Image: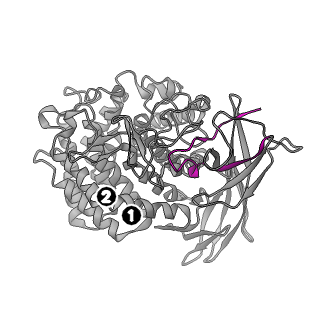
Amino acid sequence: MININGKFAEYLDIITERQLLDRKLWERCVGVFSTGIDNQDAGWRGEYWGKMMRGACLVYSVTRSSELLEVLTEAVNGLLSKQEKSGRISTYREDAEFLDWDMWARKYVMTGLQHFYDICGDEELKGRIMQALCAHADYIVDRIGEGKKDILRTGRFWGGVNAASILEPFVRLYTDTKNEKYLDFARYIISTGGCFDGSLIDCALNGLAPYQFPEQKAYETMSFFEGLLAYYEVTGEKKYLEAVQKFTDALLETDVTVIGSCGCTHELFDNSAVCQTEATGKIMQETCVTVTLIRFFARLYKATGDKRLADTIRLASLNALAGSLNINGFDQFSNEKKEYLKGLLFDSYSPLCDSKRGLGIGGFKQFADGPFFGCCACIASAGFALYPLTAVTESKDGISINYLLDGSYKTSYADVRVEDKKITLSLSESKKFSVRVTNGDAYTTVSASADGKEIKNENGFTVIDAVWNDGDVIELSVENRLVEKQLNGKISLNYGGFVLAADESKGSYKAGQQIEFIRDENGDIKYEIAEPEAGEQLRIFAETADGKLLLTDYAAAGQDGKSIVSVWFKAE
């Protein structure tokens, strides 16, 4: 159980009030399961309920809102009422099923129910959920597999990777039931390699970068590897952990951008680490990709303790994710309708170079009664919850404070309070365990001290292995730095984890402007920090030959939906 303070607490309140408590929206997401509407346009409306339910349950894990739990319970009962006697829960008609995005949507039915199961305190309802999950899964197992329909041929898009990503909830169902047929089905999915154009597992093991895979769709590919990681967690088969780690190493090297997302060519892996400086006026850096990256890295971090993953979660959360919240409600352009529409709560794409927010509504589909929704709008809440949920984690040896997010965190070792540059431990009796405190990342240095306790530095953490008493305090020193990245003749700036952005509406910056930064005797850009204005977390004036350039934190830039935003600057 946690209780956070600050900006992300505000975000979760806004998300809950403006979206997750919207009963009419939940009714629409449930209603599509009785119409066969997705057959009409190869649709994916069936994903909306499960995606939003997963995020809502994670938000509930942070906020413990009784009102939210009541709304989610209604939404779960609504979905269960749509299950057919055969076990089917689908937005595709039975006589035209297992096509296009049907398996993908069935995955999200499982995922949504499984996440609600985790927070549900009603044993009778939990029993009905498990019965529904098993019947839903059995329907699939009876019709898909060896000698039946090939799972990769249940969809004609992206090499069937979207369908193969149902791997993760099947592994989860096995862990809940210990029914071997679900693990057997997971093995079957893995045997396909996850893609009919070539095995994704072999691609990873052979050292290919994600943009070199036979299919480059970022969201679905990461979802498949998350399922592969889940399978390793259950079976201990190290080959699959190796594949996941090699995929991750390549991903970090070739496709994570300065704001912590992937894909500058629509929603595809495309060597974004290199090409990110040139993507102007395009839909790119999809919010679904950002959230899936956070989810995948959070799970892998628990398995490996690789600090690069925690650092990337922080970068993505403070920048790409936070910037996707359409807090001011700007209009968004529908490529389907060819016009601007009233904006959803989350923006689908994040600009990097001289571009605007609101340039597309990802996964746009209309409900039968007219209103529309989108894939990024229903997935984003999960990312906003995962940031605080991964701030403090446990291992067999103790506690890790992965990034400094003010709040209270309950662990099996001690209650942890992070506040005012100190960590306070509360426990009922003295206990020996390890506390690992992040040493920061490329943009922030954190040092820690604890009276009378031996301190070691290991793998980017200050490690204190000691006998702890109630009220013990770890004192912190935090130093943020202005860090510049140079790429392709351009410069980006980051201060303390916040990517800095220029916004035409806030200062003198003009698209395409050549900037000559003024540097001190050490070659560092001269700047001064100013008081943030409304909606900002950071405001900096960088000195240039043409005067002072106003920069704000990326999430605060372009929030009118009209202004040109850039994090990459042509530099002399």
Asked whether 217 or 488 is in front, the reply is 488
Q: Which residues are magenta?
A: 546-572
**Label placed on residue 17:** 1
Image quadrant in which you'd find residue 445:
bottom right
Q: Is residue 26 left or right of residue 233?
A: left
* Relative to 537, residue 294 above or below: above
Tell me which corner region of the image, top left, top right, bottom left or bottom right, holds residue 197: top left
Q: Of the residues shown, which amino acid type is indicated by label 1? A: Glu
Q: Residue furthest right?
A: 521
Q: Residue 549, percent across and down?
A: 72, 46
- The correct choice, above or below, for 24 with respect to 335 in the image is below
Q: Is residue 521 left or right of residue 397?
A: right
Snapshot colouring:
one colour
User: Would you name the residue on which mark 2 appears?
Assistant: 116
The stretch drawn in magenta includes residue 569: yes
Label 2 SS: helix
Question: What x and y, as percent, mark residue 391?
Answer: 55, 58
Given contact means CB atoms under 8 Å apart, are the residues at marks 1 and 2 in contact? no
The image shows residue 134, relative to residue 362, as above or below, that is: below
* Residue 532, position as x, y percentages in the image: 65, 60
Identify the residue at horizontal 48%, vertical 56% (top origin): 327
Q: Nearer the viewer, mark 1 or mark 2?
A: 1
- Can residue 126 be seen here? The reply is no
Q: CA distance from mark 1 to mark 2?
A: 19 Å
The residue at 33%/69% (across/down) is 67
Question: Which circle's residue, 1 or 2, is located before the other in the chain?
Answer: 1
The type of residue carrying mark 2 is: Phe
Residue 480, percent across and down?
A: 72, 55
Position above or below: 64 against 208: below
